[in-house]
Image: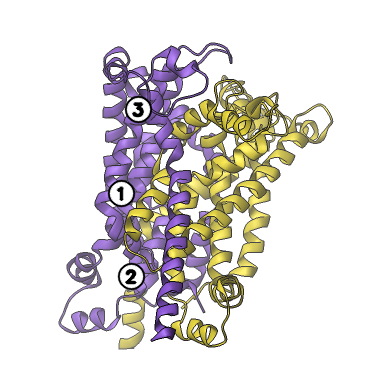
Amino acid sequence: MKKSGNTLKENLSAYAFLSPWIIGVILFTGGPIIVSFLLSLTKWNLLGQPEFVGLENYKFMFSGESDFANSLKVTILYTVISVCSSVIMSLFLAVLLNFKVKYISLFQFFYFIPAVMPSVVMAFVFKLMFNKELGIVNYMLTFIGIDNPPNWLSDNFWIWPTLAVASIFTYATGQMMLIFNSSLKEVPKELYEACDIEGANFLQRFFHVTLPSISPIILFNTVVATINSFNSSFTLIYPLTGGGPGNATQVLSLSIYENAFKLFDMGYASALAVVLFVIVGIITAFQFRLSKNWVHYD
Amino acid sequence: MGYSQTKNKQERSRKILQYSILIIVAIFMMFPILWIFSNSLKTLNGISQYPPKLIPDNPQFQNYVEVIKNSNTLIYLKNSIILIVGNTIGTLLSSAIVAYPLARMNFKGVNAIFAIILATMMVPTVTTIIPQFLLFRQLGWLDSFLPLIIPSFFAYPYNVFLFRQFFKTIPKSIDESAMIDGCTRWQVFTKILVPISKPIFITVGVLSAVYWWNELFTPLIFIDSENLKPLTVGALTSFKVQGATNLTAWNLQMAMAMIMAIPPMILYLFASRFLVEGVKTSGLKD
């Protein structure tokens, strides 16, 4: 009897500790998702009452008239590009920071600082650097003999490499760099010693020892980068391209923003939010299956 | 003797190679910031000068004076600081409290709760923003700091996750012996765990500060008044370049960018050793 009393008390106090999060989930995550779904079945411009229209918003979304197919395509493209460039770059930086040389914390400062810059600031400077006429990037390209360098920010194709570079300088990269950095230090020394005895070179060591040892962290970071790309796409793309050129970088988050807060089409914007949520949900489910490789639940 | 000499020579050329790579990458990573600084000191003509110059002919420090004097910069700055302080307090309080039972108590549903936290970590703000907007409108909170600060007091999943990872690395026996001595769970948390968890508090605090220095999306939606905008929104609208050919604001925009770049740098210098310590990955590995 005593024991179960204790367990009850322990359970109650645990949930008391958890209560801020429980309230937060209901108010800011779970509740809004349900409300979004209900709103997506209506037509509403914030004035008066929402008008029930059934699946009209979804019908329009999947019809040829909407911009949805394009938004979906560029969202996926942006996610893949930003995840790849930020994961690879952060791993590369972390490997460099594990060199056994002096002044390594100075280099860590240089590598991490761009990550803590506001994306707005980075967007400003990238606009200047990638400017067709004034930009330092094109100047350097002509300097090495490329006579007709691209107009990065106004070209449907070249905007993507620009975004890939911009993704390197986002917060996600710095955050992952720290995580990789600390996990690289935990790779067992004996494995490297065994490598040295067998005379393996740097790349062999990296691919046969380092990568397998940190593979759960790579998976973890890829998941984190995916979340970050959904969250940061607005903050980076809105000031950098505004969704352009044309609608070439009109990712779903930008679409939702414009439909909801510029055009006040709350119903359609909610439908887009629901679809984005479903996409994220699928990725989450997928991530959960993979997470068995990196999470201890105990 | 000969062997150790070749060994030394090998070692030295390896060091030189390593330093060269480190330096080249450092220049690459720092270049945008250098470029901001360089252009913030140029005249308008200096910016459109071709070829571009890294060191401006005649450094225009008055660009900074102009940015601070001619726009609402100081008001924006004050607003950014209010957001940072409010959110950091909220985040640290709520995330640490919520993470405690997840890391250190055995209770019914712990696995399910942790799974939901991981799942909600994935939900992007943009998918829930419309109902949040309606909620805050209903509460009469629009165009105030409340919708930007209050949610922090209800624990963001990612920060809870970081706290949990850290708390898990502290031996549980500390809690047990304190409880045998008559401490409640709350006392264990406030008197024992919080004081020894300085690195994670600083880490999450810095991450939160940087996040709110950076945040653009929610202030853009919830704030209308000019005198409540944070720097990100202010900078976005103050130096708007109209069309690709109108370059009037580049140098001032870069000065503004530089002003926004300095606080995170100082914060990083102050917190770097905690940042490295605070990121625990041991609990993520099999």
Density class for disc 3 (Cα within 10 Å; few <14, some 14-19, many ≥20) is some
Distance in Å between CA atoms under marks 2 and 1 = 23 Å
Residue at point 32%, 25% (across, down): B76
Question: Given the image, on which type of amino acid does mark 2 rest?
Answer: Phe
Nearer the observer, B55 or A18: B55
Mark 1 belongs to chain: B
Is residue A69 positioned above or below A188 on the image?
Answer: above
Give the mark nearer the N terminus: 2 vs 3. 3
Left/right of residue B245 with respect to residue B108 in the rendered view: right
View extreme (right): residue: A64
Question: Which residue is under mark 3?
Answer: B144
Find residue B209 and name its label: none
Question: Given the image, on which type of amino acid does mark 3 rest?
Answer: Ser
Residue at point 45%, 66% (across, down): B13
User: Residue B215 falls in which quadrant of the image?
Assistant: top left
Letter of the chain in yellow: A
Q: Position of residue A215 (x, y in %)?
A: 58, 71
Density class for disc 2 (Cα within 10 Å; few <14, some 14-19, many ≥20) is many
Q: Identify the element where label 2 is drawn.
A: helix
Please state which of the two labelled residues, at mark 2 or mark 3, is closer to the viewer.
2
Question: Which residue is under mark 2?
Answer: B167
Question: Which residue is under mark 1?
Answer: B268
Nearer the observer, A58 or B208: B208
Q: Position of residue A42 (x, y in %)?
A: 68, 31
Letter of the chain in purple: B
Left/right of residue A223 with respect to residue A65 in the rendered view: left
Q: Is residue A17 visible?
A: no
Q: Identify the element where label 3 is drawn.
A: loop
